[in-house]
Image (cartoon, coloured by chain):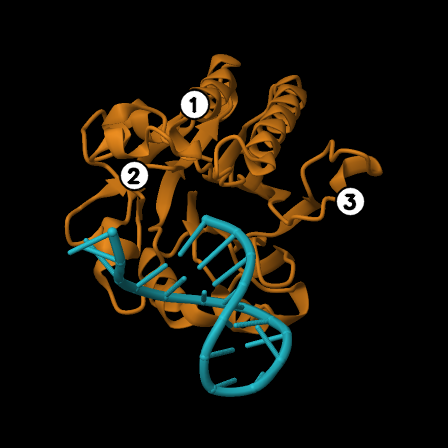
Chain colours: A orange, B cyan
Amino acid sequence: MKIASYNINGIKARLPAVTDWLTEAQPDVVIFQEIKSVDENFPREHFEDMGYNVETHGQKSFNGVAILSKRPLEDVTRGLPGAEGTGRDGEDDEQARYIEATVLGDRNAVRICGLYLPNGNPVGDEKFAYKLRWMERLEKRAKELLALEQPFLMAGDYNVIPQGIDALHPENWRDDALFQPESRGAFWRLQNLGLTEAFRARNQAAEQFTFWDFQRGAWQRNDGIRIDHFLLSPQCADLLEDCQIDKEVRGRDKPSDHVPIWVELAA
DNA sequence: ATGTCTACTTTAAGTAGA
C-alpha cells in the first residue's frame, strides 16, 4: 500500500499539478496539507472521478488538510485532540491542521494521521509557543495510539528540520522556528516514544529535501530543507518497504514549494 | 539589498501567511 503526503499550497492553484502527479504516482492513499479551502469548495468530485474517497478538514484562506484513498476510509476524525480552552476532541480548534482515518489494507488496517504542524515564526512570538503546545498535543495523541499496539503513522508537513544534514545551509536557519532546539527536541521526543522516521530509516544521504522556498531562486540553487516526514509506529515500521521523495515535481510548471514524499507498506 | 506565491478583500492594489 503506497501512502503519500503532499503540501500542495492551495488546491485552487494546484489542481493541474496535483492531478498530473496523482495520475503518475498512483498512491493508494494521499494526505494533503495547506488545501487553503473550505470543505464546500474542495474539488471532491474531481478526485472521486479519479477513484478516490475524499475526506477534508478545511477552513477559509489558510491551513486545511485532507485524506484521499482508493480504499474505504473508516472512523474519520477531524482536529488534534486537546485544543486549549475548548470542548472535546479538538472540535473547536480554530486552525484546521489535523485529520485521522483508518485504511484497510489486504492484510492490515493502518491508522493514518495527517498533520500540518504550525510554522511557528517568528521565534519568541505567540506563534512559536503555539507550535510547541501543538507538538505536546501531538505527543499525547501518539502515546494514546501507541497503547493500542496497532499499525499507525503520523505524516505531513512537520515544519521541523531534524538535523543540520536536512538543510543545504543549516546556518541560515539558526534563528528560524523550524530549526530551534525546542522544535527539534519535540520531534525527537516523538521518535523516542518508539516511532520510526521512515525516510532516515532507509536513506542517510545529504541533500534530501522536500521544500524549496519560492524566493531567492532556492530551487535553482538546491537551497532546500527536509520538513515533510513520516513517523511510523513499531507495528507499522515492520511493514515498511520503501520511502521516497518525488523531487522532480518541484521543477514542473506551477509547482508547490513542497514535493510529495511517500512510503510503501506491506499492508 | 533584493528576489515569490497564494488567497482574499479593500476587487486590480494592498494585506497576511509562509
Q: State which chain disc 2 sits on.
A: A
Q: CA distance from mark 1 to mark 3?
A: 28 Å
Please name the residue that numbered disc 3 is placed on: A91
- Residue A109 vertical placement versus A146 (above, below): below
- Which is nearer the N-term, disc 2 or disc 1? 1
Please name the residue that numbered disc 1 is placed on: A184
Residue furthest out toward the right: A87
| Crowding near the residue tagged with mark 3, few <14, some 14–19, many ≥20 C-alpha atoms within 10 Å | some
Quadrant for the N terminus of chain A in the image = top left
Q: Give the image location of residue A46, x and y in percent.
A: 52, 73
Q: Along the line of sight, which residue is nearer the eye, A113 or A170?
A: A170
Q: Along the line of sight, which residue is nearer the eye, A41 or A221?
A: A221
Q: Give the image location of residue A92, x and y in percent.
A: 78, 45
- Which is nearer the N-term, disc 3 or disc 2? 3
Q: Residue at x 63, y 56 (%)?
A: A55
Q: CA distance from mark 2 to mark 1?
A: 14 Å
Please name the residue that numbered disc 2 is placed on: A225
- Amino acid type, callout 3: Glu
